[in-house]
Image: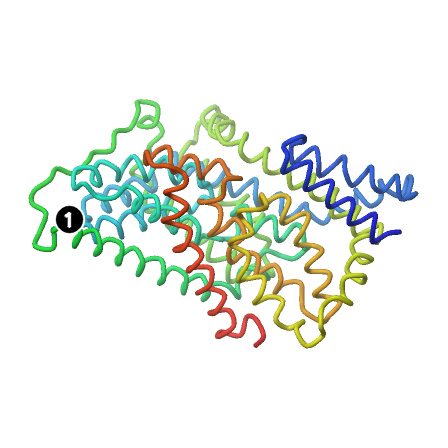
Amino acid sequence: MLPFLGLATIIVLLAAILSKRMSPLVALIIVPIAASLIGGFGLQTSKFVIDGLKSLAPVVGMFVFAILYFGTITDAGTLDPIIDRILRAVGTRPTRIVVGSTLLALLIHLDGSGAVCFLVTIPAMLPLYDRLQMDRRVLAAAVSMAAGINFLPWTGPMIRASASLHLPVSTLFNPLIPVQLTGLIFVFGTAYWLGRREEIRLGLTGGAGDIPMPKRELTAEEQALRRPKHFWFNIVLTLIVLGTMVVMGEKVPPALMFMVGLCIALMVNYPNVEMQRKRIDAHARAALMMAGILLAAGVFTGVMQGSGMLKAMAQAAVGFVPPAMAAHIPAALGLVSMPLSMLFDPDSFYFGVLPVVAEVAGQLGVPAVQVGQAALLGQMTTGFPVSPLTPATFLVVGLCGIDLADHQKFTFPLLFGASIIMTVACVVLGVFPL
C-alpha cells in the first residue's frame, strides 16, 4: 500500500506542477497532506509537517539573508568598478569580448539570480557584439555557461538539494569546490575557443580597429544608492562572510554569517533607519517567495519521510537495481542530470524525484550526499539557461534577440559538456566512487 501511495503522490505532484494546474508552493503542501490523510495517518500528519518544517529552518534562514545581503551590497555599487573594468579591458578582440562576457556574467551571478545576471550582462555586452557583427548566440552561450556553472551554497539548486535530503549545505558544497573549479576552466576555455572562432569567421585576427566601448548608464535612483567609498569595505566583508562559511561551515551556521553580514552592510552603507527598511523591502519579495517554497517543501519531505512512504518506495525499487551497479548511481545521475533539466522544473525534481533516488541509493549503501552532489552537476545548474521550464531561458533569448531553438541547439552541447567534465572530475577526485 505505502509504495503505491508514495508513487501516486509523486506522480500527482509532478503532474500538478508541470501542467501548471498548481503553483509549486500549493502542490507541495496540498498533495502530501491529502496523501497522508488518504493513507489513514490522520492527526499524525501535523507531526510530520512540523518535523519537516523544523529540519528546514536553517536552510530557509540562510537563503533569505543571503538574498538580502547580496542585494544590499549590489545596491551599494560593490560590483560597479569590477563591471566597468571588464568592459574597458575586453577591447575589440572577440576572444577578449567572449571571455569578458563570461567573467562578467559569473560575477553578476554571485547572488544566485539568473534573471539579474542576464539583465545586467547582456545589455552591457550586446553593443560590442553588434558593432563587430559577432554571432549573438555566442553571447547567449557565454552568459549561460557562466551562470550554469554556479552552484554556490546560496543558489536555488543547492538550497533545494540541501532541503530535500536534509543535509547541511557545507556537506554538499565543500567537496565540490575543486569540481566547480574544473568546470570553470572548461567554461573559460570554451569561451576563448568561441571567441577565437569568431575572430577567424570575421577575419579579425589582425585587429578589429578602433570601436567605441559601450557605456553603462545608471538611473538616478541607482546612483543615489551607490556608496563607492565603501567599495573595499564591502569586498572585505563579503570575503569574510563567504570564507567563514566555507572553512567553518560545520561550526558557524551559514545563516548566522549572512545575518551578521547583512546587519553590518546595512549599518555601514545605509546608516539611516528608513533607508535600511527600504533596502530590505526592495529585496524581500524575492527572499520570501523562495522561503515560502522551501517551507512548503518541508511539508512534502516531512510527510513523505514521517509516513514511511519514501522508505517503502525505496525498498520496493531496490530490487530493480543490480547490487554491482549501486556504486555507479552518482556518476550515472551526474551524466544525465543536465538533460533532466529539460523534463523537470527545479521544484519537482529536487523535492519529488531526488529524495526517492537518494533513498534507493541509501538502501544499496550509497550516501545520499553523493546523490545530491550528482544532481547539482547539471539539474537546473548547467541545465537551467536552456530549459523551456525556466523563465530565465526566455530572458536570454529575448535580450539577445535570437530564437529559442537556435539558442538550445548552439548552447546545449556546451552546457552538457561542462556537466560531463564535472562528473568525470568527481570520479577522478574521489568525490564519487569508481
- Give residue 399's quadrant in the image: top left
Tell me which residue sits at (80%, 49%) in the image. 6
Q: Amino acid at mark 1?
A: Leu
Q: Between residue 8 and residue 145, name the one nearer to us.
A: 8
SS of the residue at dot 1?
Answer: helix
Mark 1 packing: few (<14 Cα in 10 Å), some, or many (20+)? some
User: Vertically, is 369 above or below 72?
Assistant: below
User: Vertically, is 229 above or below 94?
Assistant: above
Tell me which residue sits at (44%, 50%) in the image. 148
Left or right of residue 152, residue 401 in this image: left
Q: Position of residue 333 (x, y in %)?
A: 58, 61
Tell me which residue sits at (30%, 61%) in the image. 189
- Is residue 307 something that shows in the picture? yes
- Give residue 418's quadrant in the image: bottom left
What colouring style does the render use? rainbow
Q: Position of residue 75 (x, y in %)?
A: 39, 34
Q: Between residue 151 and residue 223, name the one nearer to us.
A: 151
Task: Tell me the residue that label 1 is attached to.
Answer: 202
Of the 4 image quadrants, the one containing the C terminus is bottom right
Q: Position of residue 396 (x, y in %)?
A: 39, 38
- Is residue 241 something that shows in the picture? no
Q: Position of residue 117 (x, y in %)?
A: 39, 40
